[in-house]
Image (spheres, rainbow, N blue to C red):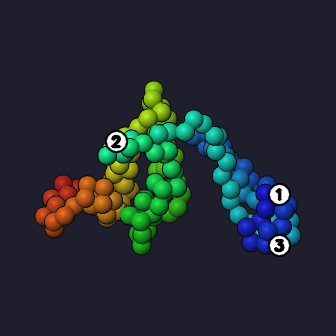
Amino acid sequence: MKCPYCLHPSTRVIDKRNSKDFSIRRRRECLKCKKRFTTYENIEVLNLIVIKRDKTKKKFDRNKLRLGILKACEKRPIKNEKIESILDYIEAELRKRKSIEVSSRLIGELVMERLKKLDKVAYIRFASVYRKFRYAGEFKKEVEKIC
């Protein structure tokens, strides 16, 4: 593992933790510059296929989902660990299904369900894009539902 700071090719593992979703978190230290960083190791499993609203199919992209959630959580007091936890939960829920094909609608609903519990503002931001709000009244109705 190369150090992300000085690109030295050797690091050592300081701490390792298993998580419930088959990923491993490793705390590492560079042998040259002594800086520390965290890496995550995930099991590679069958790729999920997302069926979009227009019926096209795309490969599931965890990073694309992360970016959407990060955008909704922008300038909110939400730690990255919470976002990673949401991503882990959603991916685990999708993989529990019998089919590798999942609808984008299901993914959006799972994200909103988790964001609603975590942060109401992030939830409204995500819902407004996901549900394509066009009028202020749509925002108002959604805010009234969660208040």
The residue under the point 78% across, 57% down is: 1
Q: CA distance from mark 2 to mark 3?
A: 50 Å
**Marker disc for residue 55:** 2
Which amino acid does the dot numbered 2 rest on?
A: Lys
The residue under the point 38% across, 50% down is: 111
What percent of the width, then of the height, locates residue 117? 35, 52
Q: Visible in this render: residue 69?
A: yes
Task: Answer with mark 2 or mark 3, whichever residue precedes in sequence.
Answer: 3
What percent of the width, then of the height, locates residue 97? 44, 30
Give the label, 2 or 3, closer to the camera: 2
Which amino acid does the dot numbered 3 rest on?
A: Cys
From the image, tell me which residue sits under label 1: 12
Element type at marker 2? loop
Q: CA distance from mark 1 to mark 3?
A: 12 Å
Specify the quadrant of the image occupied by residue 57: top left
**Residue 99 located left or right of residue 22:** left
Q: CA distance from mark 2 to mark 1?
A: 46 Å
Quadrant location, the C terminus: bottom left
Task: Answer with mark 1 or mark 3, whichever residue precedes in sequence.
Answer: 1
Task: Answer with mark 2 or mark 1, whichever residue precedes in sequence.
Answer: 1
**Marker disc for residue 33:** 3
**Is 62 placed above or below 20 here?**
below
Does the residue at mark 1 contact the one at mark 3 (Cβ under 8 Å)? Answer: no
Front-most of 54 and 69? 54
Instruction: Report the number of numbered marks.
Output: 3
What percent of the width, then of the height, locates residue 6? 79, 72
Q: Visible in this render: residue 92?
A: no
